[in-house]
Image (cartoon, rainbow, N blue to C red):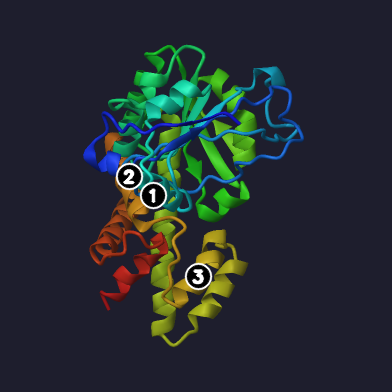
Amino acid sequence: MNAWVHRSGRGLSSAAMAMAMCSAFCPRVPRRSFLGATPALHSIPPASPLRLSARALSSPARASSSASSSPANELPGRIGFLGLGIMGTPMAQNLIKAGYKSSPEEVAAACDVTIAMLADPESAVDVACGKHGAANGMSPGKGYVDVSTVDGATSKLICGHIKGTGALFLEAPVSGSKKPAEDGQLIFLTAGDKALYEMVAPFLDIMGKSKFYLGDVGNGAAMKLVVNMIMGSMMASFSEGLLLSEKVGLDPKVLVEVVSQGAISAPMYSVKGPSMVQSQYPTAFPLKHQQKDMRLALGLAESVSQSTPIAAAANELYKVAKSYGLSDQDFSAVIEALKAKQ
Protein backbone atom coordinates (compact mmCIF):
# COMPACT_ATOMS: atom_id res chain seq x y z
CA MET A 1 0.00 0.00 0.00
CA ASN A 2 1.23 3.45 -0.90
CA ALA A 3 0.63 5.98 1.86
CA TRP A 4 1.22 9.65 2.33
CA VAL A 5 1.40 11.35 5.72
CA HIS A 6 1.43 15.13 5.67
CA ARG A 7 2.45 17.31 8.58
CA SER A 8 1.43 20.72 7.30
CA GLY A 9 -1.85 22.36 8.30
CA ARG A 10 -1.25 25.41 6.17
CA GLY A 11 -4.22 27.48 5.14
CA LEU A 12 -6.71 25.91 7.54
CA SER A 13 -8.69 27.94 10.05
CA SER A 14 -7.52 27.63 13.65
CA ALA A 15 -10.53 25.48 14.52
CA ALA A 16 -10.00 23.35 11.44
CA MET A 17 -6.29 22.99 12.04
CA ALA A 18 -6.85 21.90 15.63
CA MET A 19 -9.02 19.02 14.50
CA ALA A 20 -7.65 18.40 11.01
CA MET A 21 -7.01 14.80 10.25
CA CYS A 22 -3.87 13.51 9.34
CA SER A 23 -3.15 10.85 6.82
CA ALA A 24 -4.15 9.90 3.33
CA PHE A 25 -4.23 6.29 2.24
CA CYS A 26 -4.81 5.88 -1.49
CA PRO A 27 -3.48 2.56 -2.77
CA ARG A 28 -3.76 1.84 -6.43
CA VAL A 29 -6.61 -0.60 -6.94
CA PRO A 30 -6.20 -3.14 -9.76
CA ARG A 31 -8.95 -2.32 -12.25
CA ARG A 32 -9.81 -5.98 -12.72
CA SER A 33 -10.08 -6.87 -9.05
CA PHE A 34 -13.42 -5.42 -7.95
CA LEU A 35 -15.75 -8.37 -8.43
CA GLY A 36 -15.45 -10.92 -5.66
CA ALA A 37 -12.85 -9.05 -3.60
CA THR A 38 -13.32 -8.14 0.06
CA PRO A 39 -13.66 -4.43 0.88
CA ALA A 40 -11.60 -2.94 3.68
CA LEU A 41 -13.94 0.04 3.77
CA HIS A 42 -17.40 -1.35 4.41
CA SER A 43 -19.11 1.25 6.53
CA ILE A 44 -19.52 4.99 6.41
CA PRO A 45 -20.34 6.51 9.80
CA PRO A 46 -22.38 9.70 10.11
CA ALA A 47 -20.39 12.88 9.78
CA SER A 48 -18.73 14.05 12.95
CA PRO A 49 -19.08 17.48 14.51
CA LEU A 50 -15.51 18.28 13.48
CA ARG A 51 -15.17 21.54 11.63
CA LEU A 52 -12.78 20.00 9.12
CA SER A 53 -11.30 16.57 8.79
CA ALA A 54 -9.78 14.73 5.90
CA ARG A 55 -9.02 11.12 5.28
CA ALA A 56 -8.60 9.19 2.09
CA LEU A 57 -9.25 5.51 2.02
CA SER A 58 -9.34 3.02 -0.79
CA SER A 59 -8.93 -0.68 -1.21
CA PRO A 60 -9.97 -3.57 -3.41
CA ALA A 61 -13.74 -3.53 -3.24
CA ARG A 62 -16.44 -5.99 -4.15
CA ALA A 63 -19.51 -5.04 -6.14
CA SER A 64 -22.69 -6.93 -6.79
CA SER A 65 -23.20 -8.31 -10.27
CA SER A 66 -25.91 -5.73 -10.89
CA ALA A 67 -24.00 -2.85 -9.32
CA SER A 68 -23.29 -0.82 -12.41
CA SER A 69 -23.60 -0.73 -16.13
CA SER A 70 -20.01 0.54 -16.41
CA PRO A 71 -17.38 -1.93 -17.54
CA ALA A 72 -14.89 -2.89 -14.86
CA ASN A 73 -12.00 -1.19 -16.61
CA GLU A 74 -13.72 2.18 -16.14
CA LEU A 75 -13.70 1.97 -12.34
CA PRO A 76 -11.52 4.55 -10.62
CA GLY A 77 -8.24 3.27 -9.23
CA ARG A 78 -8.08 5.43 -6.09
CA ILE A 79 -10.91 6.56 -3.86
CA GLY A 80 -10.51 9.32 -1.26
CA PHE A 81 -12.80 9.94 1.69
CA LEU A 82 -13.22 13.28 3.48
CA GLY A 83 -15.06 13.36 6.78
CA LEU A 84 -14.72 11.39 9.98
CA GLY A 85 -17.49 9.93 12.07
CA ILE A 86 -17.92 8.36 15.47
CA MET A 87 -15.06 5.84 15.09
CA GLY A 88 -12.74 7.97 13.02
CA THR A 89 -12.68 10.93 15.37
CA PRO A 90 -10.64 9.41 18.22
CA MET A 91 -8.35 7.73 15.69
CA ALA A 92 -7.70 11.09 14.06
CA GLN A 93 -7.17 12.80 17.40
CA ASN A 94 -4.42 10.33 18.28
CA LEU A 95 -2.68 11.08 15.00
CA ILE A 96 -3.10 14.81 15.57
CA LYS A 97 -1.35 14.43 18.92
CA ALA A 98 1.55 12.90 17.02
CA GLY A 99 1.74 15.99 14.82
CA TYR A 100 0.30 14.70 11.54
CA LYS A 101 -2.05 16.73 9.36
CA SER A 102 -3.38 16.61 5.84
CA SER A 103 -5.50 18.86 3.66
CA PRO A 104 -8.49 18.00 1.46
CA GLU A 105 -6.50 19.40 -1.46
CA GLU A 106 -3.81 16.76 -0.98
CA VAL A 107 -6.38 13.98 -0.70
CA ALA A 108 -8.19 15.06 -3.88
CA ALA A 109 -4.91 15.42 -5.78
CA ALA A 110 -3.85 11.90 -4.82
CA CYS A 111 -7.13 10.17 -5.71
CA ASP A 112 -9.23 9.59 -8.81
CA VAL A 113 -12.55 10.00 -6.99
CA THR A 114 -13.01 11.83 -3.68
CA ILE A 115 -16.07 11.22 -1.48
CA ALA A 116 -17.00 13.82 1.15
CA MET A 117 -19.30 13.30 4.16
CA LEU A 118 -19.52 16.48 6.24
CA ALA A 119 -21.83 17.54 9.04
CA ASP A 120 -23.36 20.73 7.66
CA PRO A 121 -23.33 23.13 4.69
CA GLU A 122 -20.61 25.31 6.18
CA SER A 123 -18.24 22.36 6.64
CA ALA A 124 -19.07 20.98 3.21
CA VAL A 125 -18.20 24.30 1.55
CA ASP A 126 -15.07 24.75 3.69
CA VAL A 127 -13.72 21.31 2.81
CA ALA A 128 -14.54 21.57 -0.89
CA CYS A 129 -13.97 25.25 -1.65
CA GLY A 130 -11.83 26.69 1.14
CA LYS A 131 -8.14 27.48 0.99
CA HIS A 132 -6.40 24.15 0.36
CA GLY A 133 -9.85 22.65 -0.09
CA ALA A 134 -10.55 19.66 -2.29
CA ALA A 135 -11.33 21.75 -5.38
CA ASN A 136 -7.69 22.87 -5.46
CA GLY A 137 -6.64 19.26 -5.91
CA MET A 138 -9.20 18.44 -8.61
CA SER A 139 -8.49 18.30 -12.33
CA PRO A 140 -10.02 16.86 -15.52
CA GLY A 141 -10.62 13.14 -15.21
CA LYS A 142 -11.23 13.26 -11.45
CA GLY A 143 -14.58 13.10 -9.66
CA TYR A 144 -16.01 14.56 -6.45
CA VAL A 145 -18.96 12.88 -4.72
CA ASP A 146 -20.54 14.87 -1.88
CA VAL A 147 -22.71 12.68 0.36
CA SER A 148 -23.28 15.43 2.94
CA THR A 149 -26.81 16.64 3.68
CA VAL A 150 -26.89 20.25 2.50
CA ASP A 151 -29.34 22.59 0.79
CA GLY A 152 -29.53 22.83 -2.98
CA ALA A 153 -27.79 26.20 -3.13
CA THR A 154 -24.79 24.82 -1.23
CA SER A 155 -24.63 21.77 -3.47
CA LYS A 156 -24.70 23.95 -6.58
CA LEU A 157 -21.99 26.19 -5.14
CA ILE A 158 -19.69 23.22 -4.51
CA CYS A 159 -20.55 21.83 -7.94
CA GLY A 160 -19.49 25.08 -9.58
CA HIS A 161 -16.09 25.03 -7.88
CA ILE A 162 -15.47 21.38 -8.73
CA LYS A 163 -16.60 21.56 -12.34
CA GLY A 164 -14.58 24.75 -12.76
CA THR A 165 -11.49 22.54 -12.55
CA GLY A 166 -12.74 20.26 -15.32
CA ALA A 167 -13.62 17.48 -12.86
CA LEU A 168 -17.00 15.75 -12.50
CA PHE A 169 -19.42 16.31 -9.61
CA LEU A 170 -22.13 14.16 -8.05
CA GLU A 171 -24.25 15.01 -5.03
CA ALA A 172 -25.27 11.85 -3.20
CA PRO A 173 -26.79 12.52 0.24
CA VAL A 174 -27.69 9.35 2.11
CA SER A 175 -30.86 8.27 3.85
CA GLY A 176 -29.90 6.20 6.88
CA SER A 177 -27.95 6.55 10.12
CA LYS A 178 -25.26 4.69 12.07
CA LYS A 179 -26.58 1.11 11.90
CA PRO A 180 -27.52 1.21 8.19
CA ALA A 181 -24.09 2.72 7.51
CA GLU A 182 -22.38 -0.11 9.39
CA ASP A 183 -24.48 -2.71 7.57
CA GLY A 184 -24.07 -1.18 4.11
CA GLN A 185 -27.81 -0.44 3.96
CA LEU A 186 -27.80 3.27 3.12
CA ILE A 187 -29.94 4.82 0.38
CA PHE A 188 -28.09 7.18 -1.97
CA LEU A 189 -30.02 10.10 -3.52
CA THR A 190 -27.78 11.23 -6.35
CA ALA A 191 -27.80 14.00 -8.93
CA GLY A 192 -25.23 15.55 -11.20
CA ASP A 193 -22.85 14.08 -13.76
CA LYS A 194 -24.33 10.79 -14.98
CA ALA A 195 -20.91 9.54 -16.06
CA LEU A 196 -19.59 9.88 -12.50
CA TYR A 197 -22.72 8.21 -11.14
CA GLU A 198 -22.13 5.21 -13.37
CA MET A 199 -18.44 5.15 -12.46
CA VAL A 200 -18.98 5.07 -8.69
CA ALA A 201 -22.13 2.91 -8.72
CA PRO A 202 -20.20 -0.20 -7.52
CA PHE A 203 -18.96 1.71 -4.49
CA LEU A 204 -22.43 3.05 -3.70
CA ASP A 205 -23.68 -0.53 -3.85
CA ILE A 206 -21.05 -1.57 -1.29
CA MET A 207 -22.10 1.19 1.10
CA GLY A 208 -25.84 1.07 0.45
CA LYS A 209 -28.81 -1.08 -0.43
CA SER A 210 -30.21 1.20 -3.12
CA LYS A 211 -29.45 4.29 -5.15
CA PHE A 212 -31.51 6.77 -7.14
CA TYR A 213 -30.32 9.07 -9.91
CA LEU A 214 -32.47 12.23 -9.82
CA GLY A 215 -31.05 14.39 -12.59
CA ASP A 216 -29.72 17.90 -12.06
CA VAL A 217 -27.65 18.98 -9.07
CA GLY A 218 -29.96 20.16 -6.29
CA ASN A 219 -32.52 17.39 -6.75
CA GLY A 220 -30.60 15.00 -4.51
CA ALA A 221 -30.34 17.63 -1.79
CA ALA A 222 -34.04 18.45 -2.08
CA MET A 223 -35.08 14.79 -1.86
CA LYS A 224 -32.94 14.24 1.24
CA LEU A 225 -34.40 17.29 2.98
CA VAL A 226 -37.97 16.19 2.24
CA VAL A 227 -37.21 12.70 3.60
CA ASN A 228 -35.63 14.07 6.78
CA MET A 229 -38.46 16.56 7.26
CA ILE A 230 -40.92 13.66 7.24
CA MET A 231 -38.71 11.64 9.59
CA GLY A 232 -38.34 14.50 12.06
CA SER A 233 -42.09 15.11 12.11
CA MET A 234 -42.77 11.39 12.60
CA MET A 235 -40.42 11.23 15.58
CA ALA A 236 -42.07 14.26 17.20
CA SER A 237 -45.53 12.71 16.79
CA PHE A 238 -44.29 9.34 18.07
CA SER A 239 -42.89 11.10 21.14
CA GLU A 240 -46.27 12.68 21.83
CA GLY A 241 -47.93 9.28 21.58
CA LEU A 242 -45.51 7.64 24.01
CA LEU A 243 -46.04 10.33 26.61
CA LEU A 244 -49.81 10.40 26.16
CA SER A 245 -50.08 6.61 26.54
CA GLU A 246 -48.18 6.74 29.80
CA LYS A 247 -50.18 9.67 31.14
CA VAL A 248 -53.51 7.90 30.63
CA GLY A 249 -52.26 4.75 32.36
CA LEU A 250 -51.16 2.65 29.39
CA ASP A 251 -47.82 0.88 29.10
CA PRO A 252 -45.73 2.73 26.47
CA LYS A 253 -43.78 -0.48 25.82
CA VAL A 254 -47.02 -2.08 24.65
CA LEU A 255 -47.72 0.96 22.47
CA VAL A 256 -44.38 0.39 20.73
CA GLU A 257 -45.41 -3.20 20.00
CA VAL A 258 -48.84 -2.19 18.74
CA VAL A 259 -47.44 0.51 16.47
CA SER A 260 -44.77 -1.86 15.15
CA GLN A 261 -47.41 -4.36 14.03
CA GLY A 262 -49.91 -2.01 12.46
CA ALA A 263 -50.36 0.07 9.34
CA ILE A 264 -48.13 2.87 10.67
CA SER A 265 -45.24 0.52 11.42
CA ALA A 266 -41.80 1.96 10.69
CA PRO A 267 -38.38 0.55 11.61
CA MET A 268 -37.60 3.80 13.40
CA TYR A 269 -40.37 3.17 15.94
CA SER A 270 -39.43 -0.40 16.79
CA VAL A 271 -35.70 0.40 16.95
CA LYS A 272 -35.86 3.61 18.98
CA GLY A 273 -39.08 3.12 20.95
CA PRO A 274 -37.74 0.74 23.65
CA SER A 275 -34.83 3.02 24.54
CA MET A 276 -37.04 6.11 24.49
CA VAL A 277 -39.32 4.47 27.07
CA GLN A 278 -36.23 4.17 29.27
CA SER A 279 -35.22 7.79 28.59
CA GLN A 280 -32.09 6.63 26.81
CA TYR A 281 -30.99 8.07 23.48
CA PRO A 282 -27.86 6.34 22.12
CA THR A 283 -26.70 8.49 19.24
CA ALA A 284 -27.25 7.15 15.75
CA PHE A 285 -28.30 10.48 14.21
CA PRO A 286 -27.52 13.53 16.36
CA LEU A 287 -30.44 15.74 17.27
CA LYS A 288 -28.56 18.85 16.14
CA HIS A 289 -28.30 17.40 12.62
CA GLN A 290 -32.00 16.57 12.55
CA GLN A 291 -32.85 20.13 13.55
CA LYS A 292 -30.45 21.45 10.91
CA ASP A 293 -32.22 19.37 8.28
CA MET A 294 -35.63 20.55 9.49
CA ARG A 295 -34.42 24.14 9.18
CA LEU A 296 -33.12 23.56 5.66
CA ALA A 297 -36.32 21.75 4.66
CA LEU A 298 -38.43 24.65 5.92
CA GLY A 299 -36.26 26.99 3.88
CA LEU A 300 -36.85 24.81 0.82
CA ALA A 301 -40.59 24.92 1.42
CA GLU A 302 -40.49 28.68 1.84
CA SER A 303 -38.70 29.04 -1.50
CA VAL A 304 -41.69 27.52 -3.31
CA SER A 305 -44.39 28.94 -0.99
CA GLN A 306 -45.34 25.51 0.35
CA SER A 307 -47.06 25.49 3.74
CA THR A 308 -45.47 23.05 6.22
CA PRO A 309 -47.14 23.73 9.59
CA ILE A 310 -46.51 20.25 11.02
CA ALA A 311 -42.80 20.31 10.21
CA ALA A 312 -42.54 23.87 11.53
CA ALA A 313 -44.04 22.84 14.86
CA ALA A 314 -41.74 19.82 15.06
CA ASN A 315 -38.75 22.04 14.34
CA GLU A 316 -39.60 24.16 17.36
CA LEU A 317 -39.49 21.05 19.56
CA TYR A 318 -36.03 20.15 18.26
CA LYS A 319 -34.87 23.69 18.98
CA VAL A 320 -36.15 23.38 22.56
CA ALA A 321 -34.36 20.05 22.94
CA LYS A 322 -31.14 21.67 21.73
CA SER A 323 -31.56 24.40 24.33
CA TYR A 324 -31.64 21.65 26.98
CA GLY A 325 -28.18 20.49 25.94
CA LEU A 326 -29.36 17.47 23.93
CA SER A 327 -27.70 18.40 20.63
CA ASP A 328 -25.35 15.43 20.59
CA GLN A 329 -27.95 12.92 21.78
CA ASP A 330 -29.93 10.92 19.23
CA PHE A 331 -32.75 12.87 17.61
CA SER A 332 -35.22 10.69 19.52
CA ALA A 333 -34.27 12.81 22.54
CA VAL A 334 -36.76 15.35 21.19
CA ILE A 335 -39.21 13.63 23.54
CA GLU A 336 -37.45 15.43 26.41
CA ALA A 337 -38.70 18.75 25.05
CA LEU A 338 -42.26 17.47 25.46
CA LYS A 339 -41.60 16.13 28.96
CA ALA A 340 -40.47 19.56 30.05
CA LYS A 341 -43.77 21.06 28.96
CA GLN A 342 -45.84 18.78 31.21
| Distance in Å between CA atoms under marks 3 and 1 | 34 Å
Answer with left or right where residue 291 lies relative to residue 45: left
Instruction: Out of 22 and 141, give the one closest to the viewer.
Output: 22
Instruction: Out of 115 and 335, give the one closest to the viewer.
Output: 115
Q: Are marks 1 and 2 in contact (CB under 8 Å)?
A: yes
Q: Secondary structure at mark 1?
A: helix
Write the residue at 57% across / 46% down: 43
Q: Which residue is mark 2?
A: 19
Write the residue at 71% across / 30% down: 34
Q: Which residue is mark 3?
A: 273
| Distance in Å between CA atoms under marks 1 and 2 | 7 Å
Q: Secondary structure at mark 3?
A: helix
In the displayed structure, would residue 119 be above or below residue 257? above
| Residue 339 occupies quadrant | bottom left
| Distance in Å between CA atoms under marks 2 and 3 | 35 Å
Going from N to C along the chain, the mark reached first, 1 or 2, is 2
> Closer to the camera: disc 2 or disc 3?
2
The quadrant the C terminus occupies is bottom left
Q: Amino acid at mark 2?
A: Met
